[in-house]
Image (cartoon, helix red, strand yellow):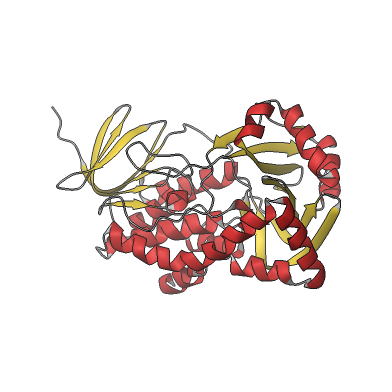
Amino acid sequence: MCELKHRDAIVIGGGPAGCAFAIELARHGLDVLLIEKTSGPHHKVCGDFLSGDALALLHYLQVDAFALGAIPIRDLQVFCGNRSRKTRLPFAATALSRYRLDESLLDKASETGAHVVRGAMVRRVDETGSGVEIRTDTGRHLAQAAAVATGKHAMPGIAHPQSALVGFKQVLDLDPAAAGHGTVMLSVYESGYQGLQMTDKTRASACWVVDRSDAKRLGADWSRHRAYLSERSRHMGRLLTRSQPTMARPLAIAGMPFGHLRRHACANRIYMIGDQLGSIPSLAGDGIAIALGSGILAAHAMVKAHDASRFHGDMYRALRRQFAFARPAHALMTHRAGQAVAMAALDLFPGLMRTVATATRFEAAAQVVQDCA
């Protein structure tokens, strides 16, 4: 029987967080294995929004978002019933499909020296006396440490919070002139919200959140979802009516743990990164920046021999202010009374949206790039 190879690190998940972790460790000469369950390119339930922080971190990882076809985003427009407010974003931003971004990051991880395995499902991760053991549907792997980067999907054996919210996504063929090129549109309604933006010259990403009871009633029928969203915003309804879906049914993910920020490690050798570390409400638009930054910082922690407990304590302190602003913003914008208060406040203080957008940025991103320069 062949002896199992004992690697320096294994990362579970090939999204932005997992790839950032693998790229940074490989740059430091470590032997890292990345396990991704999908065998090829695919869409994810994600708004495809890249904040200025995310762009800076991608640049550090030597991934050019604009070369991949990213669309510049300049404005934010919020719809609440028949009312709307529009403002210029206080930072550079783009939209880029995760379909292209994730593949580019996986290619970069492989090019940098990480071993990438696709089409393998991880069944369990356990800390052992000498490191970490990973069990997949095809065998097992050993390493000194592991990172869990499975997004909002729970990892067997590791506690992960759940909520009553369900997220959906549809990719649309849409005339950019109708959609408002360079604008991310956010429609808020009772118990949820919808975001829509162009991700290339002819396609738009539409993501929305509803509670579990509405999700059950709507099912997987796109026409039902379109009618539901159109009832809540006339403007969004006109855009959805003029568009063509590219998928027979919308993608879905249940139990969105918005606002959860992990304070403690589940084991000293297992680093939780990306949404497994903290799931910022999607209306903040900084999820990918947190994913990339946490992956890079977890790699630095491992190189410096800082265990997962220390890493999680450092990340909690770095993210808690950002989450402290994002949680109440999410709560306010998903309840009718809160929406009325928010829209009235925007009438009185036109710059409020820019202030909130600035307050919900990943402040540690600039430090990551500066420290690594």
| Residue at 44% in and 44% down | 161
Q: Hey, which quadrant is residue 242 in on the image?
A: top right
Q: Position of residue 81 (x, y in %)?
A: 82, 49
Residue 341 visible in the picture: yes
Q: In the figure, is residue 360 to the left or right of 157?
A: right
Please tell me how many numbered marks the rendered image carries. Answer: 0
Residue most toward the front?
337
Viewer-nearest residue: 110 or 291: 291
Q: Is residue 210 left or right of residue 151?
A: right
Q: Residue at x 25, y 33 (%)?
A: 140
Q: Where, quadrant-wise, is the C terminus in this rendering?
A: bottom left
Residue 237 placement (x, y as % from top left): 83, 40
Residue 138: image location, x then y, percent: 31, 27
Q: Where in the figure is residue 113, as x and y percent of width and height?
A: 35, 50
Q: Is residue 195 above or below residue 290?
A: above
Q: Where the N terminus falls, by quadrant?
A: top left
Residue 191, by quadrant, is: top right
Q: Relative to 351, is 15 above or below?
A: above
- Which is more toward the observer, 112 or 35? 35
Can residue 67 be seen here? no
